[in-house]
Protein backbone atom coordinates (compact mmCIF):
# COMPACT_ATOMS: atom_id res chain seq x y z
CA UNK A 1 0.00 0.00 0.00
CA UNK A 2 1.09 3.54 -0.65
CA UNK A 3 0.02 6.28 1.72
CA UNK A 4 0.23 9.82 0.35
CA UNK A 5 0.95 12.45 3.00
CA UNK A 6 1.10 16.25 2.84
CA UNK A 7 2.66 18.63 5.43
CA UNK A 8 3.20 15.74 7.83
CA UNK A 9 5.46 15.27 10.83
CA UNK A 10 5.40 12.03 12.80
CA UNK A 11 2.81 9.31 13.04
CA UNK A 12 2.79 5.54 12.63
CA UNK A 13 1.25 3.04 10.24
CA UNK A 14 0.66 -0.32 11.94
CA UNK A 15 3.14 0.77 14.63
CA UNK A 16 5.94 1.61 12.13
CA UNK A 17 7.02 5.29 12.17
CA UNK A 18 6.14 7.34 9.10
CA UNK A 19 9.50 8.38 7.68
CA UNK A 20 8.99 10.60 4.64
CA UNK A 21 12.45 12.15 5.06
CA UNK A 22 15.28 9.64 5.31
CA UNK A 23 17.58 9.85 8.33
CA UNK A 24 20.52 10.91 6.16
CA UNK A 25 18.49 13.93 4.95
CA UNK A 26 17.93 15.38 8.43
CA UNK A 27 20.21 17.54 10.54
CA UNK A 28 20.70 16.77 14.24
CA UNK A 29 19.33 19.52 16.48
CA UNK A 30 17.11 21.15 13.86
CA UNK A 31 13.33 21.19 14.31
CA UNK A 32 11.38 18.83 12.04
CA UNK A 33 10.00 20.27 8.80
CA UNK A 34 6.62 19.07 7.47
CA UNK A 35 7.16 16.75 4.51
CA UNK A 36 5.17 15.72 1.45
CA UNK A 37 5.47 12.30 -0.10
CA UNK A 38 4.58 8.63 -0.17
CA UNK A 39 5.15 5.96 2.43
CA UNK A 40 5.03 2.36 1.20
CA UNK A 41 4.18 -0.56 3.45
CA UNK A 42 3.34 -4.18 2.97
CA UNK A 43 0.15 -4.81 4.92
CA UNK A 44 -0.74 -8.32 3.72
CA UNK A 45 0.44 -11.39 5.59
CA UNK A 46 -1.27 -14.10 3.58
CA UNK A 47 -3.69 -14.85 0.77
CA UNK A 48 -6.77 -14.38 2.96
CA UNK A 49 -5.78 -10.76 3.68
CA UNK A 50 -6.34 -9.73 0.03
CA UNK A 51 -10.10 -9.38 0.55
CA UNK A 52 -9.78 -7.47 3.83
CA UNK A 53 -6.47 -5.61 4.23
CA UNK A 54 -6.09 -3.85 7.57
CA UNK A 55 -3.95 -0.93 8.59
CA UNK A 56 -3.97 1.50 11.49
CA UNK A 57 -2.68 5.07 11.29
CA UNK A 58 -1.90 6.68 14.65
CA UNK A 59 -0.58 10.14 15.41
CA UNK A 60 0.13 11.36 18.93
CA UNK A 61 2.63 14.12 18.13
CA UNK A 62 1.59 17.80 18.41
CA UNK A 63 2.34 18.30 14.71
CA UNK A 64 0.28 18.19 11.53
CA UNK A 65 -0.66 15.04 9.66
CA UNK A 66 -2.57 15.12 6.37
CA UNK A 67 -3.39 11.89 4.57
CA UNK A 68 -4.30 12.68 0.95
CA UNK A 69 -4.80 9.16 -0.33
CA UNK A 70 -4.28 5.43 0.08
CA UNK A 71 -3.27 3.45 -3.01
CA UNK A 72 -3.37 -0.32 -3.25
CA UNK A 73 -1.70 -2.42 -5.91
CA UNK A 74 -1.13 -6.12 -6.41
CA UNK A 75 2.06 -7.38 -8.06
CA UNK A 76 1.72 -10.75 -9.74
Image (cartoon, rainbow, N blue to C red):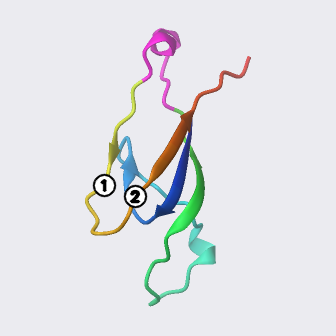
* Secondary structure under the numbered disc 2 in the rendered image: loop
Residue 7 screen position, x and y as percent: 49, 64
Residue 21 belongs to magenta span: no
Look at the image and say whether residue 50 sits in the magenta stretch: yes
Lateral position of residue 46 relative to residue 74, left or right: left
Q: Using the image, determine if residue 50 lies above or below residue 59.
A: above
Q: Which mark is residue 59?
A: 1
Q: Please determine whether, in this image, residue 52 is positioned above or below residue 67.
A: above
SS at circle 1: loop
Question: Who's the residue at 34% across and 68% down the image?
Answer: 63
Q: Are marks 1 and 2 in contact (CB under 8 Å)?
A: yes
Give the percent coordinates (x, y) of residue 64. 37, 64
Q: Quadrant of the C terminus?
A: top right
Answer few, some or many: residues within 10 Å of disc 1's Cα (few below 14, many 20 plus, some between 14 and 19). Answer: some
Q: Which residue is at the front of the view, 29 or 72? A: 72
Q: Which residue is mark 2?
A: 65
**Residue span colored magenta:** 43-53
Q: Is residue 25 left or right of residue 13?
A: right
Task: Give the position of the N terminus as an image quadrant.
Answer: top right
Of the two numbered discs 1 and 2 on the same chain, state the one appearing first in sequence: 1
User: In the picture, residue 24 is in which quadrant?
Assistant: bottom right
Mark 2 closeness class: few <14, some 14–19, many ≥20 residues within 10 Å = some
Amino acid sequence: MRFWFNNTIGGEINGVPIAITRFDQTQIGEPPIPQNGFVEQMVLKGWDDVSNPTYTITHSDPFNIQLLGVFYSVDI
